[in-house]
Amino acid sequence: MDLILFGPPGAGKGTQAQFLVETYGVPQVSTGDMLRAAVKAGTPLGVKAQEIMARGGLVSDDIVLGIVAERLAQDDCSSGFVLDGFPRTIPQADALDGILKQAGRAIDHVVSLEVDSEEIVKRLSGRRSCPSCGKGYHVVFDAPVKADVCDVCGTGLVQRADDQEDTVRNRLLVYEQQTAPLKEYYQSKQILCSIPGIGPIAEIQQRIAAALEK
Ligand code: ADP
Ligand code: ADP
Ligand code: ZN
C-alpha cells in the first residue's frame, strides 16, 4: 500500500504514521525526520537545509526529491510506504508520480487530516519527542508516563526549535500557500480522503482504518 499522510504541521501525521506502520507493516518515510538527521550529522545537504528549517520555510524541491527518491528505492519500501510530510508542493507531487510510474506503481490513497490553526498552535507548543527513538508525545494530550522521559527507551524528551510560536505561524502560512493546493490536486485524481483530525488519537486511528478499508 503506497500512502500519503497529508495535513498541516501538527495535524498528527507522525502520530498516526506510527499506527499505520504497526498495522500495515510498511515503513514511515518522513522527510522532516530525514532532514533533521542530515542537519544533526552536518552533511552538506544538512548544512543547506538548516537555516531554512529554522525559519519554517520549505527546503528546495531538488534536495527533498533527492532524498525521497533514494529512500523509496530501498528494499523495505518495495511493498508500500507511508509518506509523512511529503509532498509539500505541486512540483514535488508531480516528481513523486514520475518516480513511482517508473517502478510501475502509483499512490493508492492520500489521507488528509483536517485540523484548524487554533488547535495546531496548542498541539505544537506542547509537542515533545524522543531524540533517541523518535517517538512523539504531547505534554497534555499524549503525555509520557513519567514527565519529560520517553516511555519506550527512557531518554529525556526534547522540544523542536521550530515549534516556537512565531515559527509555527510562518509554517502555517507556508502550508496554506504552497501545500494546501495539493488537496485539489489529489482530489482531481480521486484518491483524496479527508478525515476530521480532532478528537482522541485512537478515534482518529479508527477513522483512518475505516477509510482505508473501504
Ligand atoms: P505532525 O507530524 O502532523 O506535525 P504530530 O503527530 O507530531 O504532527 O502531532 C503534533 C502534536 O500533537 C504532538 O505533540 C502530538 O502528540 C499531538 N497530537 C497528535 N494527535 C493528536 C490528537 N488527536 N489530539 C491531540 N493532540 C494530538
Ligand atoms: P511537521 O511535522 O511539523 O509538519 P516536518 O517534520 O514534516 O514538520 O518538517 C519540518 C521542516 O522540514 C519543515 O518546516 C521544512 O522546513 C522541512 N521539510 C520537511 N519536509 C519537506 C518537504 N517535503 N519539502 C520541503 N521542506 C520540507
Ligand atoms: Zn525513546
Image (cartoon, rainbow, N blue to C red):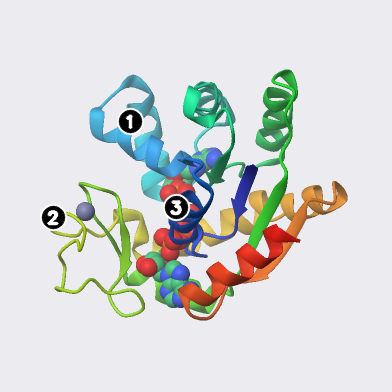
What is the x, y in percent for residue 50? 35, 37
79 vs 199, nearest the viewer: 79
* Ligand 2 within 8 Å, label 1 CB: no
Q: Residues within 10 Å of mark 3 (few under 14, many from 20)?
A: few
Q: Position of residue 165 (x, y in %)?
A: 38, 67
Q: In this rendering, is residue 3 above or below 80? A: below
Q: Which mark is residue 38?
A: 1
Whether residue 19 is visible to the viewer of this picture, yes or no, is yes
The residue drawn where x is 49% and y is 44% is 25
Q: Amino acid at mark 1?
A: Ala
| Residue wearing tag 3 | 22
Residue 113 in the figure: left or right of residue 13: right
Kindly identify the residue that appears in the image at 61 percent across and 44 percent down. 88
197 or 163: which is nearer to us?
197
Q: Is mark 2 within 8 Å of ligand 3?
A: yes
**Mark drawn on residue 155:** 2
**Is 32 drawn above or below residue 200 in the view shown?**
above
Q: Quadrant of the C terminus?
A: bottom right
Q: CA distance from mark 2 to mark 1?
A: 21 Å
For this rendering, which residue is in front, 183 or 49?
Answer: 183
Residue 162: where, in percent of width, then height? 35, 55
Q: Is residue 97 above or below residue 12?
A: above
Q: Secondary structure at mark 1?
A: helix
**Frontmost residue, 208 versus 166:** 208
Quadrant of image for the N terminus: top right
Q: Given the image, on which type of amino acid does mark 2 rest?
A: Thr
